[in-house]
Image: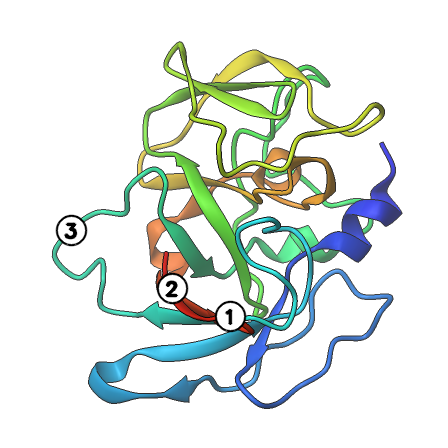
Amino acid sequence: MRWAALVLAAAVLSACGGGTVPPSSQTAPASTATSTNGGVRGYTATGGSMLPTISAGETVVVDPNAYAKAAPKVGDIVVFYPPADAALQPPVCGARHTARQVCPAPGARRSSDLLIRRIVAGPGDAIKVIDGHVIRNGQREPGEHIKPCRAGDACEFPAAVTLPVDDYFMMGDNRGSSDDSRFWGPVPQAWIVGKVVGIVGGSGARGA
């Protein structure tokens, strides 16, 4: 596995209009987000883990109240705090597992940094990854939003694991160049900051 490639490709968030990301860092501290009407916040993506859905420099509009009355859903794009050990090189999983499995559990502490990824599985789901695609409870995920893996990418985890209660599995759409739950585990719902409800880029606003 080319850990350096995963580190450099991680999608990090900084506040709209401010903040820079050191090129050698996997994650960078996110400053306070810009608030708009209704508590919605904007963040600017600074990496390529969510290509082709979100490009570096595009702003994502995040609703922090999206999950006040409803649980997160598979397919949602969210902003969240990863485990603290995700910042290590290589990242550290919170539970023992084989090389044929994704990381089944996060570490106990969360990071102070923010990431943006897509939820691909939820509490109690049994998952494995084949050619970068999640097989969730025996069903292959839709692939139209995914940038495919290339030879040599860390995209094969054929032995299934079952997610803990309350945890959500996060992956970038750029499956061959995303540092995500495959390596440092799923994320408790309490660590999810909000749901991406819109994307603002050079071609204008669009839904997420």
Of circles 3 and 1, the one toward us is: 1
Residue 181 lies in what quarter of the image? top right
Q: How crowded is mark 1: few (under 14 residues within 10 Å), some or many (20 or more)?
A: few
Q: Position of residue 126 (x, y in %)?
A: 41, 18
Query: Gap between marks 3 and 1, in whole Å?
Result: 31 Å
Precedes in sequence: disc 3 or disc 1: 3
Residue 206 numbered mark, or none: 2
The correct choice, above or below, for 27 with respect to 145 in the image is below
Q: What element carries label 1?
A: loop
Cβ–Cβ below 8 Å for labels 2 and 1? yes
Residue at the spot of label 1: 203
Quadrant, the N terminus: top right
Of circles 2 and 1, the one toward us is: 1
Looking at the picture, which amino acid does disc 1 mark?
Ser
Of circles 3 and 2, the one toward us is: 2
Query: Gap between marks 2 and 1, in whole Å?
Result: 9 Å
Tell me the residue at 75%/60% (across/down). 26
Residue at the spot of label 3: 70
Quadrant, the C terminus: bottom left
Q: Where is residue 66 in the image (x, y as percent from the top left)?
A: 23, 62
Tell me the residue at 40%/9% (across/down). 138
Looking at the picture, which amino acid does disc 2 mark?
Arg
Q: How crowded is mark 3: few (under 14 residues within 10 Å), some or many (20 or more)?
A: few
Instruction: Give left or right: position of 108 versus 40.
Output: right
Q: Is mark 3 on a helix, strand or loop?
A: loop
Looking at the picture, which amino acid does disc 3 mark?
Ala
Query: Gap between marks 3 and 2, in whole Å?
Result: 23 Å
